[in-house]
Image: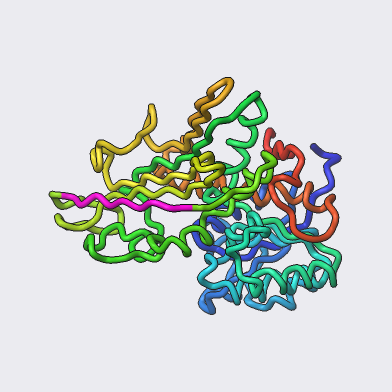
Amino acid sequence: MSALVKKRIVLWGTGVVGSMVAAELVDHPAFELVGVGVSNPAKVGRDVGEVCGLGRTIGVRCTDSVEELVALRPDALVHYGPTAQHADENIRVMSSFLRAGIDVCSTAMTPWVWPAMTQTPRSWLDPIEEACREGGASCFSTGIDPGFANDLFPLTLMGLCGRVDSVRASELLDYTDYEGDYEDEMGIGRPPEFTPLLEIPELLVMAWGATVPMMAAAAGIELDDITTTWEKWVTPTDRKTAKGVIEAGNVAAIRFTINGVFQGREVITLEHVNRIGLDAAPEWPAGSQDDVYRVDILGSPSITQETSFRFTDGSGRAPAVAGCLATGMRALNAVPAVNDLPPGWVTALDLPLVPGVGTIR
């Protein structure tokens, strides 16, 4: 590894995902952290080691100046900003790097996982396409949902089949110890009559459905329709969570699907079952072990795969958080491959195998 030429990286975003990636990045033999961008004024000027809780100073101070970070001329920006609810700010930051000829790998704008999806507004696409053309740069967006659990895993397994009748990619997670946002987005912890954002079909498809038409395109078909389902489970008892208590009578589990319809049948399905407590909604799907991402293919042959993400460092961090780290590392580890690709959008279908250079050391 001593002869490895490091990629110079600017990291944007020091929330849950960004902080965990920073901890992996600072000692990584394949990457050099040269700059860190933040949106919170309280973090500006502080060492990234302090901001991300790394237990030591790194010698890189956080800044909210995009211009200052672009001037560092990194090989790539790895962007762990907020969701598409903050699209304008995400586009402002990322397009600035792209116009300067700096590739971007991000987890923030999940509709960009498959930019050809018709539901994505042009106002979210045109600025990036223009910036890529102007700077001759590439933009790759990933994430667990959507992302490798919903495209890389099922697409790889579909390549082992002679015929696929249907493919289902499921997230089956207990959110008891998860501190991410799920109240307004999913309605967990809210009364059953509350309508969360993702229960609205158009928003659900646009936010998390991009891998459905991606898988269809990869298989050489064009879907007739994309449909959704949404179910809620109300807890009869109070349930403790890392964020407080969900009182009896409120939603403590949700199940939804996004379905790609071809020739009158559902052939591609993304499914989420998110619970507070493993005993919640016992009739809904669960994995052979707790907290897994599952792929089920009916075909010739039929295939089932379960993948779990865990921390084994004694920290006690939840499997859902381990999945968040995997999300972030997918974006970082893709940098060398994205650097080698032509300018423009990059999807999972454009990437070669990304084995994680420098991970074994």
Q: How is the image coloured?
A: rainbow
Give whichever of 61, 5 is nearer the camera.
5
How far from the left and from the top, in percent, is residue 338? 78, 51
Tell me which corner region of the image, top left, top right, bottom left or bottom right, holds residue 247.
bottom left
Position of residue 10 relative to residue 90, above or below, is above
- Check residue 252 for magenta coloring: no
Give whichever of 238, 8 is nearer the camera.
238
How far from the left and from the top, in percent, is residue 77? 71, 62
- Check residue 234 for magenta coloring: yes
Quarter the N terminus occupies: top right
Position of residue 209 relative to residue 349, above or below, is below
Position of residue 204 relative to residue 229, above or below, is below
Residue lying at the far top in this picture: please name it. 301
How far from the left and from the top, in percent, is residue 301? 57, 20
The residue that appears at 44% across and 44% down in the rendered structure is: 271
How far from the left and from the top, in percent, is residue 190? 25, 62
Q: Is residue 358 visible?
A: no
